[in-house]
Amino acid sequence: MKLEGRLREEVAAALPALFAERSALRRLSALLAVLARIIGSREATPLATLAWQPPESAADRVVERVLAFVLEHRAQSLPQERVARVAGVSPAGFSRWFRSRVGRTWRAFLTEVRVADACRLLADSDRPVTDIALSCGFANLSNFNRRFRQVQRTSPRAYRRAARGRDPELR
């Protein structure tokens, strides 16, 4: 991505605080917030459109399209068949296709993206955990807690305390 204008200024202003943060969890949360701002911006120019960028393969463009689709629709229900259509591959072969190109299953990737969103919200808001879970695309609190622990190795509530500097053992 090439950052321009106001977006570039916002990212540049956020970076010193990100590197100055002592808590690894807060640093991660701040980094995810910056990345979410970049991804959600129309001011960022994909490097593929710049003249000096080496041409991408057709497979790379398909992966980029699928990842962008998953990021854009991450809070919605994403059945494998829907994502397979975006990739232009059969639903039966999609899991192998995605894993071979991204290095993890698409469900694991989606879970990681959703948990990253939840981490940002847990650290930066006072919203109830249930509201955060539902807004990040998890069907229920039980599934959210299980997936969150799987990715972060801690509970959402403990993550929130640590991110706010209230639990020094988790920093």
Image (spheres, rainbow, N blue to C red):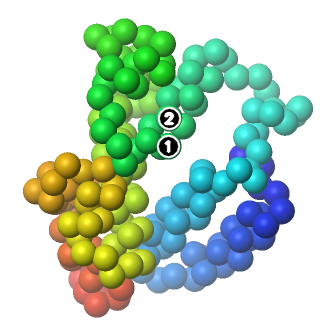
Disc 2 marks a residue whose amino acid type is: Phe
Left or right: where 92 falls relative to 75: left
Farthest bottom residue?
166
Q: Residue 46, how many percent across, how many down?
A: 73, 40
Q: Residue 49, how many percent across, how many down?
A: 80, 33
Q: Secondary structure at mark 1?
A: helix
Q: Residue 152, how many percent across, how many down?
A: 27, 60
Farthest left residue?
142
Spatial separation of the CA atoms under disc 1 and disc 2: 5 Å
Q: Residue at left 42%, top 78%?
A: 124
For residue 100, which quarter of the picture?
Answer: top left
For residue 9, which quarter of the picture?
Answer: bottom right
- Label 1 neighbour load within 10 Å: few <14, some 14-19, many 20+: few
Which corner quadrant holds the C terminus? bottom left
Left or right: where 152 falls relative to 68: left
Considering depth in this image, is 42 or 150 the residue closer to the camera? 42
Circle 1 sits on which residue? 72
Instruction: Say if 64 sits above or below 7 in the image.
Output: above
Q: Secondary structure at mark 2?
A: helix
Considering depth in this image, is 121 or 109 the residue closer to the camera? 121
Disc 1 marks a residue whose amino acid type is: Glu
Q: Residue 8, how many percent across, how many down?
A: 77, 64
- Label 2 neighbour load within 10 Å: few <14, some 14-19, many 20+: some
What numbered label is drawn on residue 89? Answer: none
Circle 2 sits on which residue? 69
Q: Are marks 1 and 2 in contact (CB under 8 Å)?
A: yes
Q: Residue at left 34%, top 63%?
A: 118
Q: Residue at left 38%, top 79%?
A: 125
Q: Residue at left 75%, top 32%?
A: 48
